[in-house]
Structures are given as C-alpha cells and as structure tokens.
Image (cartoon, rainbow, N blue to C red):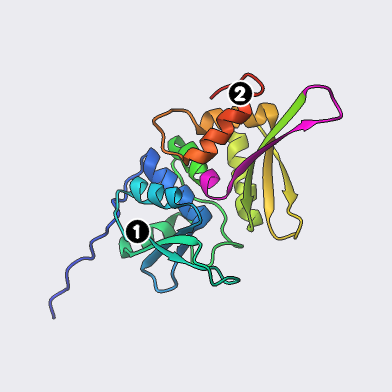
Amino acid sequence: MGKRGPKPKGQVKIQWSPRFAYAIGLMVSDGNLSPDGRHINFTSKDLELIQLFQESLDIKIHIGKKANSSSKKKSYFVTQFSDVLFYKFLMSIGLMPNKSKSIGEIQVPPRYFFDFLRGSFDGDGCTFSYWDKRWKSSFMFYTCFVSASPPHINWLRQEIHKRIGIRGHITMDGRHILQQLKYAKADSLKLLRKMYYSRNAIFLSRKRLKIDKMLAIVGERL
C-alpha cells in the first residue's frame, strides 16, 4: 500500500465569526466557485470591497483587473485563489458553481446572520430615498436586496421575518431578470440597526455613509 500524500492545507481559516460571516455574504453576492473544485473568485467594481473580502478572511492575495463580457475596458477588480478545503466548506453550506439563478438557503449560524446579511447587502444590496410629492414633507427610504434566484430571495425574506418580524415586499426589475426584496422606512430602519449593530463591524464605507446621510434627513441615526 503506497504512502498517502500530505493533507491539503487551506489558506482560509474556517471558523465562524462576525467577519467570516460577512465574507460569506460577499461570496453569495459577488463570489464565484470555479467548476474545477478548488478555485474561489471574487469580483467587484469597488476596490474597497475586494480589500474587505480579503480582510474578513485574513488572506492577502493579488488583486487584478478584468473586463466584463460587453466591454474591453478592465473596469472590474478581481481576486482569485485556490483552497480545496474552503471550496468544499462553501459547497456544504449552500454555495455552488453558476449559483446566480439557483442558490437558495445558506447555512449560517443564527448569531451571525446579520453579519452575513450585511455582507450580502454590501455586495448586491442598496438603499434609495426620495421626497414623496403626494404628501408634504414626506421623505421615503428603502433598503433593498437583489438576486436572480427566487429561492434565495424568499429564504432571505423568511429569515429576516423570523428574527425581527418585518415582511418586506418582492418586486421584479424592469428586465424581469432580478428579484428585489425591499423594506420601507420604519422596517428599513429596524433592519439597518440590526445589520449595523456596531461601529466596529466591518462594512463598505460608501454604503454606510449614504445610509447615515439618508437617516439624518429624518433625524435618525444608527
């Protein structure tokens, strides 16, 4: 019987924590698993988000640039690394190659759900606001999560409702490709306070700044 080779060593320490859960949220939104069973890719137009991804996993890997399918201009930042153990872990909690339309539930420990959700929001979420002209001095604002996978959006909605009792509503984008889970005003504020429960939590600075400015208009803060 031949000698067994050395066990594979992972670059990522697989241990749940607020930052690790945040990274999983980013993976669900902007990450990709290669069909080769070992490579993990994370792509974003936002350099800070790439840096936060690496920071939250405590890894330091080359950051490159690439173009999308419709342009030759390299306007996207990308980081890619090989880690069989982390790849298998991601598969075990619900991620998969070519996940965008088929991903569903992600197995996140309950205590880290809102860290995971903040990562998902920083990847594919947004806030928007406007003055509603139908009523005097009526300022509306929303928190929104976006996905091409109906099972994933429905799972997010169920999990958020289970934890803080808000339902939100689901709409389709103009092209009927993406589903949008939206929370308005009071529910949005309740959700944001859960997601940004600490100034020490890791988050994308430009989205947090936008939220702070939006809430200041109605005299609220996180």
Residue picked out by circle 1 = 86
Q: Which residues are magenta?
A: 120-137
Horizontal side of 65 relative to 139 (left or right) equals left
Looking at the image, is mark 2 or mark 1 nearer the viewer? 2
For the residues marked 2 and 1, what is the alpha-carbon distance in whole angstroms? 41 Å
Q: Residue at x 70, y 60 (%)?
A: 177
Mark 2 lies on residue:
216
In reply to whether residue 128 is colored magenta, the answer given is yes
Q: Residue at x 67, y 39 (%)?
A: 128
- Taking 129 as reference, is 126 left or right? left
| Quadrant in the rendering for residue 40 | bottom left
Query: Can you tell which mark lies on residue 211?
Result: none
Say above or below: 17 vs 70: above
Residue 33 appears anywhere in the view: yes
**Residue ID at (64%, 58%):** 148
Pick the residue in front: 95 or 68: 68
Q: How many marks?
A: 2
* Callout 1 amino acid: Phe
- Residue 131 percent coordinates (x, y): 76, 30
Across and down, in percent, residue 111 comes to 44, 35
Q: Residue furthest front?
A: 73
Q: Quadrant of residue 126?
A: top right
In the rendered structure, the answer to whether residue 70 lies left or right of residue 5 reads right
Quadrant of the image for the N terminus?
bottom left
- Where in the figure is residue 222, as x and y percent of width and height? 53, 25
Q: Secondary structure at mark 2?
A: helix
What is the x, y in percent for residue 42?
Answer: 44, 59
Q: Is residue 16 left or right of residue 4?
A: right
SS state under label 1: helix
Q: Residue at x 49, y 61 (%)?
A: 76
Task: Decide which of tag 2 and tag 1 comes sooner along the chain.
Answer: 1
Pick whichever, 115 or 211, lies toward us: 211
